[in-house]
Image: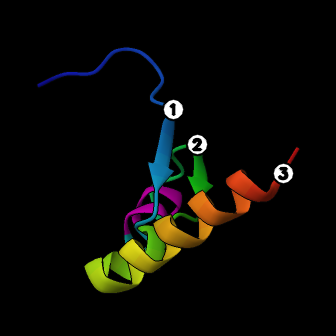
Amino acid sequence: MDITHKIQVINVGLEFFRDELERQEIPVVHLDWHPPAQGNSAVLQLLKQLRGTKKEAQP
């Protein structure tokens, strides 16, 4: 595949992918993102409950 135009990348969460793009001098914007509660479903449920409680307490 021959790419004839300049590539620009938005990278979400994968630092090693960003590093490789930068090594090749490809412009990249990195978003440091992780799944809520690091993907732990039990902790995620607790966070949802806390958010629900917080919303109900607001006027």
Nearer to the camera, 8 or 48: 48
Nearer to the camera, 49 or 29: 49
Direction from residue 22 to residue 45 in the image, left or right: left
Q: Would you identify the image quadrant in which residue 50 lies?
A: bottom right
Magenta segment includes 45: no
Residue 19 position within the rendered picture, expressed as x and y whole percent measured from the top left: 48, 69
Q: Amino acid at mark 2?
A: Pro
For marks 3 and 1, the one nearer the N-term is 1
Q: Amino acid at mark 1?
A: Gln
Q: Which residues are magenta?
A: 17-22
Q: In 3D space, how far apart are the residues under numbered discs 3 and 2 (Cα atoms)?
A: 43 Å
Q: Quadrant of the C terminus?
A: top right
Q: Which residue is mark 3?
A: 58
For marks 3 and 2, the one nearer the N-term is 2
Please give the name of the residue rendered at 72% of the width and 62% of the height, measured from the top-left corner. Answer: 54
Q: Amino acid at mark 3?
A: Gln
* Residue 3 visible: yes
Q: Which residue is mark 2?
A: 27
Q: Quadrant of the N terminus?
A: top left
SS for callout 2: loop
Circle 1 residues within 10 Å: few <14, some 14–19, many ≥20: few
Label 2 close to label 1 by CB (< 8 Å): yes
Nearer to the camera, 54 or 9: 54
Circle 3 residues within 10 Å: few <14, some 14–19, many ≥20: few
Q: Which residue is mark 1?
A: 8
Q: Would you identify the image quadrant in which residue 7 lies?
A: top left
**Depicted 23 relative to depicted 59: above or below:** below
